[in-house]
Amino acid sequence: RGMGADETAFRFNFTFGEDDGGPSVGNGDPPIKDARSPKRPRPATGTETAQELRIPEPSRGSHPTTSDRHDRFALQDVGGSVRLWKVVELMQQSTLVQGLDEETDLVPGRYEGGFKVWECSVDLCEHLVEAYGLKPAGDGACLKGRLEGSRVLELGCGQGLPGVLCLLGGAEQVVFQDFNGEVLRYVTQPCVQRNLGGRDPDGTTGSVRYISGDWDGCGDLLERESFDLILTAETIYEPKSVPSLLDLLAWCLKPGTGVALVAAKVYYFGVGGGVAPFEEEVRRQGLFHIEHVRSVDDGASNMREVLLLRRKPEG
């Protein structure tokens, strides 16, 4: 994935120390100077079998414990007056990042960059805030908007900020999927807990599921045509993975009313993916209508897009 303004804020305190490159959005740091060159992926070393992880849901109305250090989190602006907590320091040793260095931020078949918050994930959040009218409902409360009762799936979720936003906006259920189980355990679930803890005293937010593994195996764990909204960000950088993504979207998305939102860079230097190759594969597959609903050109990184997909009527 090409680097961007928010992507180097995450730190592995046991491996790299604190990055001094790109800042968090909204924390007052200067923007990254050059985001055009990607870190090169290493050769694939294996695959991940899809499975559902039994991670305890956050305690409703509870606050982070003393062991859940506040300085491992930072606030992220995601549009309007909405801010979410993100993980900025991994407190547990992860085998996924052992041996990684600054020449790579993904290892195909092993680690797909899920510990970081990538800038297209923030773009996707900003679009959700605008498109679904999400606003704070009051002090210490969740968000109000047009997501109440929705079933949401976030693919390649990483920290899962878009899915967290949907939970706070009243979604009935959010399923977080990532290639790596350790990502779900070490950053997704803590991010869910930090954002929901203390903000939902009535227990009104929806249920949560966590699924790890390759997209080709996820369909067996997900109900067919059952999701109102499917979200994915920074997942089309590798062209050969796009058919599997589209197959899973076709399996999971509700016909007629269901919407999929894909946030991506226009082009991923060095790996070949991007918006144009993705659109070409969508047209080749022939199952979806596609439209551009958001464009971002901040002058600090590669241009970015949010794409909306709907299933074509059968027949």
Image (cartoon, rainbow, N blue to C red):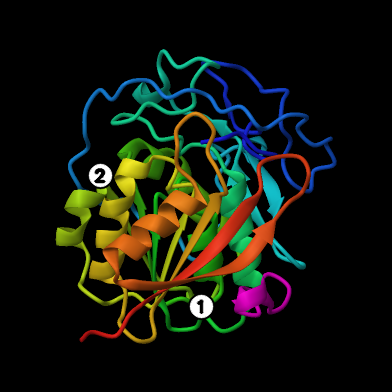
Tell me the amino acid under the disc marked 1: Gly
- How many numbered discs, if any? 2
Q: Residue 292: in sight, yes or no? A: yes
Residue at image point 40% right, 57% down: 280
Give x and y (percent) for residue 255. Answer: 30, 82
State whether residue 202 is above or below residue 273: below
Residue at mark 1: 170
Task: Name the mark nearer the viewer: 2 or 1.
Answer: 2
Residue at image point 58% right, 51% down: 120
Q: Which residues are magenta?
A: 130-143
First along the sequence among labels 2 and 1:
1
Q: Residues within 10 Å of mark 1 (few under 14, many from 20)?
A: many
Q: Main secondary structure of the magenta part?
A: loop
Residue at mark 2: 213
Kindly state the secondary structure of the residue where label 1 is placed.
loop
Of 164 and 196, which appears nearest the observer?
Answer: 164
Taking the image as shown, residue 82 lies to the left or right of residue 259, namely right
Q: Residue 52: in sight, yes or no? A: no
The image quadrant of residue 200 is bottom right
Q: Is residue 225 magenta?
A: no
Tell me the amino acid under the disc marked 2: Gly
Give x and y (percent) for residue 167. Answer: 49, 69
Taking the image as shown, residue 37 lies to the left or right of residue 113, namely right
Mark 2 touches mark 1? (CB < 8 Å) = no
State whether residue 241 is above or below residue 100: below
Give x and y (percent) for residue 215. Answer: 25, 50
Q: Is residue 135 magenta?
A: yes
Residue at image point 65% right, 80% down: 133
Taking the image as shown, residue 231 lies to the left or right of residue 216, namely right
